[in-house]
Image: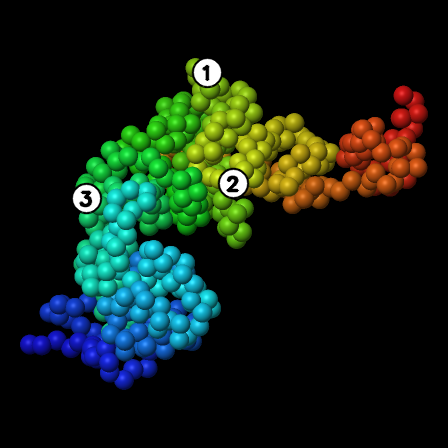
């Protein structure tokens, strides 16, 4: 008995009204089509670009097969919003593709050697299928007649090696990526090609964490032994950024690195935390590595809309206890680990990011990450909060409180998952910082250089007097500019 199938029109037939309607198919059919939700998501996404249906139709009339490929197809099947759209055009040469696209506007040759074009007004990459040789600078061969299997075999993981025909709605999946998505398994389309590009190793890390998937036995074996030389720090930075910003449990990637024995090679400062004991009274979760893994998962769960700030907090959670590797004594005490961790954090971060600002800011949070606990023990007054807020700037006491919260939540002795409780000292710290009006920014100095120029000439002495004035302002809560001026100039005369 024949099954119902979507009507596939000839490429030269009159256009249908943008993507053919989805019609259910039975397993008897050899073709597969997008599920209903994914199909609707695709229509909704592509409708954002009103000119796109006409471009697809023009390419189809020219004899091309127009495919949405890569991560967008994966995200469709996962019912995730689509961001970057890559469209691969089969059966046309690059020159013919460029000629058709030029009918709709100016075309940028953003990667002509790789067969990638872009219309100026559309944030979409258009390409023709290609094959790559091994190495950092692969020889690229563009082939309009490559089969789908040949074209997709160059992709890193099977879940990225799928395509959707934008005319017929057919799902092209020669390496069974859809099934791997369901099973939560990462596989290489062509294992012999996977090791040709060491960047793929880092992409496996972020896919593991983002989608909570596990590499199969073959891919794991490849990742244990493949060379990782030749990957630029810029590309490594991008992969870690995706991992931290899009994963609910970034620890999955680092735990796997430890499991396959590559953590000491890639991130030796983090590997040094494995087996470093902690007092069970305060850290029932185990060693410092386990604590750190729970802390980054806790930080990843925080609702921080600004991506750069969220990245900062997660990186700070990753680095906050690195100093324990060198300061821990028998019994698990680690006096001075916060300042000791600053230099170690800088070494680790230099392997993970190109951002000098990020390294500097994370190091600052590492240095002061125990302040919330210390302030509670000492009953710190408003002046202490104000001084600390000034030391942290442009970071804030709120940033510090988030790192401290990740630290406290990373102490679950019954599970690898972080705790969800919010300790009293963190709430007290936030309350007092808010009361002192310095939770999100330091107090501004009320006495400025121009206010003293009639009495003190520009120079080092003026700078010292201004610093003393600000310290006095914070310590005694002076809010009157003239009173503060009188006090600091009076001290100057006595000297």
Front disc: 1 or 3 = 3
Quadrant showing the N terminus: bottom left
Mark 3 element type: helix
Where is mark 3, residue-wise? 192
Quadrant showing the C terminus: top right
User: How many numbered discs sit on the rendered protein?
Assistant: 3
Q: Which residue is drawn at 26% across and 63% down?
A: 163
Q: Callout 3 environment at 10 Å: few (<14), some (14 to 19), or many (20+)?
A: few
Residues 313 and 89: in front is: 89
Q: Which residue is drawn at 35% across and 68% down?
A: 98
Q: Callout 1 environment at 10 Å: few (<14), some (14 to 19), or many (20+)?
A: some
Query: Is residue 398 in sight in this rendering?
Result: yes
> Which quarter of the figure has residue 168?
bottom left
Q: Which residue is drawn at 75% across and 42% down?
A: 444
Where is mark 2, residue-wise? 355
Front disc: 1 or 2 = 2
249 sits left or right of 335 in the view:
left
Task: Give the answer, above or below, for where 152 lies relative to 260.
Answer: below
Where is mark 1, residue-wise? 329
Estimate the x, y position of residue 200 in percent, counting from the top left.
31, 44
> Considering only order in the chain, which callout, 3 or 1, is on the residue closer to the N terminus?
3
Farthest residue, direction top:
330
Task: Give the answer, above or below, for where 432 lies relative to 125.
Answer: above
Estimate the x, y position of residue 339 in percent, counting from the top left.
56, 25
Q: Which residue is drawn at 42% across and 27% down?
A: 269
Mark 2 element type: loop
State the CA–CA distance, disc 1 to disc 2.
33 Å
> Which quarter of the figure has residue 417?
top left
Estimate the x, y position of residue 238 in percent, counting from the top left.
42, 46
Task: Give the answer, above or below, for where 155 lies relative to 279.
Answer: below
> Considering only order in the chain, which callout, 3 or 2, is on the residue closer to the N terminus?
3
């Amino acid at each position: 008995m024949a099954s119902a199938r979507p009507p596939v029109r000839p490429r030269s037939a009159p256009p249908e009204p943008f993507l053919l309607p989805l019609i259910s198919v039975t397993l008897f059919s050899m073709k597969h089509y997008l599920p209903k939700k994914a199909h609707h998501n695709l229509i909704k996404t592509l409708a954002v670009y009103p000119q796109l249906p006409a471009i697809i139709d023009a390419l189809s009339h020219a004899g091309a097969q127009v495919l949405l490929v890569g991560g967008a197809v994966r995200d469709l099947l996962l019912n995730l919003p689509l961001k970057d759209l890559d469209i691969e055009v089969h059966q046309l040469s690059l020159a013919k593709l460029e000629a058709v696209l030029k009918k709709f506007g100016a075309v940028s040759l953003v990667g002509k050697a790789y067969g990638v074009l872009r219309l100026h007004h559309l944030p979409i990459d258009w390409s023709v299928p290609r094959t790559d040789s091994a190495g950092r600078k692969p020889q690229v061969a563009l082939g309009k007649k490559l089969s789908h299997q040949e074209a997709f075999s160059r992709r890193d993981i099977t879940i990225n090696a799928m395509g959707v025909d934008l005319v017929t709605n057919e799902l092209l999946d020669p390496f069974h990526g859809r099934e791997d998505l369901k099973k939560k398994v990462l596989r290489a389309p062509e294992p012999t090609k996977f090791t040709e590009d060491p960047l793929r190793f880092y992409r496996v890390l972020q896919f593991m964490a983002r989608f909570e998937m596990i590499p199969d036995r073959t891919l794991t074996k490849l990742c244990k032994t493949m060379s990782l030389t030749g990957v630029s720090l810029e590309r490594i930075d991008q992969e870690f950024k995706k991992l931290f910003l899009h994963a609910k449990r970034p620890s999955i990637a680092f735990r796997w690195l430890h499991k396959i024995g590559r953590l000491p090679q890639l991130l030796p400062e983090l590997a040094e935390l494995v087996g470093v004991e902690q007092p069970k009274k305060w850290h029932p979760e185990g060693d410092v590595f386990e604590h750190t893994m729970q802390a980054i998962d806790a930080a990843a769960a925080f609702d921080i809309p600004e991506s750069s700030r969220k990245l900062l907090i997660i990186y700070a959670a990753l680095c906050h206890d690195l100093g324990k590797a060198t300061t821990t004594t028998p019994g698990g005490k680690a006096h001075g680990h916060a300042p000791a961790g600053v230099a170690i954090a800088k070494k680790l971060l230099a392997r993970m990011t190109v951002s000098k600002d990020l390294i500097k800011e994370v190091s600052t949070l590492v240095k002061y990450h125990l302040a919330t606990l210390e302030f509670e023990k000492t009953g710190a007054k408003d002046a202490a909060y104000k001084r600390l807020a000034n030391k942290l700037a442009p970071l804030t006491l709120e940033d510090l409180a988030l790192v401290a919260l990740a630290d406290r939540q990373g102490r679950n002795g019954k599970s690898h998952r972080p705790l969800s409780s919010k300790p009293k000292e963190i709430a007290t710290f936030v309350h007092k910082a808010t009361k002192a009006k310095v939770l999100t920014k330091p107090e501004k100095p009320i006495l400025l250089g121009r206010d003293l120029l009639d009495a003190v000439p520009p120079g080092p002495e003026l700078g010292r007097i201004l610093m003393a004035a600000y310290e006095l302002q914070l310590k005694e809560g002076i809010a009157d500019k003239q009173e503060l001026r009188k006090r600091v100039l009076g001290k100057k005369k006595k000297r």
